Image (cartoon, rainbow, N blue to C red):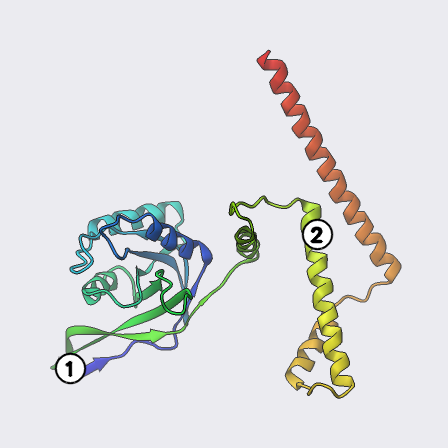
């Protein structure tokens, strides 16, 4: 018997939009289904797969998991027309355990892409009430005949997976997180000035923590860490050396520009509302 192992150096990086689509589809599923299945879209690098989007693929029952491959192929072609940079990189299912028939579904995706990834998303929140995500790659096994492997099945080998975000995605997820403190679970996007104030408050908080950490090391209350010291040195070297007065002038100029943009936007908005009322009367 021979075993063809997958490349375990692969790493799966998944973005929030793909996870939001999976969770949203799970919440809107039919009551007769315990799980949902779907396709993962993204890009592939030499040592990683980056998942940007996903969509649901209909299946018949949870036990048999009869997959609608025609629907999956058609939807993937539609997505490629919208965004040609993203291709099929694998598939997913929800639940705490792999579904039966996962090897058959995975075999279909081996014809769609090279080394597809299988993502298992636990949306039940039963395991310590945490949102768990696992990633696997398929390894074919079977009997070797004349230097060729006659595949008889697939063994799923786990690979690392992590959630990554762009700056824009991080801002959106932070805004969503603020909704859990509201009894109506509703949030409003902050204004530009509120965003500046929030950023300055976070920066001040981090500077205070950093100052207390450095003071603790100098006073001998905390052990020193050479790695953190080198990171702080690199951080300090990246800060431009600007005269305090010039820096204050730059900040004031930027703030004045921001206030001017906000004033003009409010004026344009008022003009549009006034024009709408005049034309409707």
Q: What label sits on residue 210 in the rendered view? A: none
Nearest to the observer: residue 155 or residue 209: 209
Farthest residue toward the top? Answer: 281
2 vs 1, front mark: 2
Farthest residue toward the right? Answer: 245
Disc 2, SS? helix
Looking at the image, residue 70 lies above or below residue 259: below
The image quarter in which residue 102 lies = bottom left
Looking at the image, residue 272 lies above or below residue 190: above
Q: CA distance from mark 2 to mark 1?
A: 64 Å
The image quarter in which residue 50 lies = bottom left
Nearest to the observer: residue 185 or residue 188: 185
Q: Residue at x 76, y 39 (%)?
A: 260
Farthest residue toward the front? Answer: 183
Q: How many marks?
A: 2
Nearest to the observer: residue 13 or residue 219: 219
- From the viewer's perspective, is 46 left or right of 66? right
Q: Residue at x 74, y 35 (%)?
A: 263
- The answer to which of marks 2 and 1 sits earlier in the sequence is 1
Nearest to the observer: residue 31 or residue 2: 31
Q: Residue at x 77, y 66 (%)?
A: 240
Q: Quadrant of the C terminus?
A: top right
Q: Position of residue 71 (x, y in %)?
A: 23, 48
- From the viewer's perspective, is 6 left or right of 281? left
Q: What label sits on residue 147 in the rendered view? A: 1
- From the viewer's perspective, is 27 left or right of 71? right
Q: What label sits on residue 196 in the rendered view? A: 2
Q: Quadrant of the N terminus?
A: bottom left
- Alpha-carbon neighbours of circle 1 within 10 Å: few (<14), some, or many (≥20)? few
The image quarter in which residue 188 lies = top right
């Amino acid at each position: 018997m021979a075993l063809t192992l997958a490349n375990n150096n692969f790493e799966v990086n998944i973005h929030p939009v793909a996870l939001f689509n999976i969770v949203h589809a799970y919440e809107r599923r039919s009551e007769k289904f315990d799980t949902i299945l779907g396709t993962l879209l993204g890009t592939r690098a030499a040592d990683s797969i980056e998942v940007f989007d996903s969509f649901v693929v209909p299946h018949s029952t949870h036990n048999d998991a009869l997959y609608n491959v025609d629907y999956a192929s058609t939807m993937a072609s539609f997505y490629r027309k919208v965004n040609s940079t993203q291709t099929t990189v694998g598939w997913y299912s929800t639940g705490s355990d792999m579904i039966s028939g996962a090897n058959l579904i995975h075999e279909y995706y081996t014809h769609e892409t090279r080394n597809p990834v299988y993502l298992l998303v636990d949306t039940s929140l039963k395991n310590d009430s945490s949102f768990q995500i696992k990633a696997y790659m398929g390894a074919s096994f079977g009997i070797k005949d004349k230097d060729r492997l006659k595949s008889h099945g697939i063994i799923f080998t786990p690979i690392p997976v992590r959630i990554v975000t762009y700056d824009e995605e991080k801002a959106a997820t932070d805004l969503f997180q603020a909704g859990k403190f509201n009894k109506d679970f509703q949030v409003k996007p902050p204004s530009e000035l509120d965003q500046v104030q929030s950023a300055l408050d976070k920066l001040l908080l981090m500077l205070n923590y950093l100052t207390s950490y450095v003071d603790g090391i100098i006073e001998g209350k905390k052990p020193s860490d050479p790695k953190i010291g080198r990171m702080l040195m690199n951080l300090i070297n990246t800060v431009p050396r600007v005269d305090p007065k010039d820096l204050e002038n730059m900040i004031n100029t930027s703030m004045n520009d921001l206030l001017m943009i906000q004033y003009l936007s409010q004026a344009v908005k008022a003009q549009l509302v006034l024009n709408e009322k005049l034309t409707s009367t």
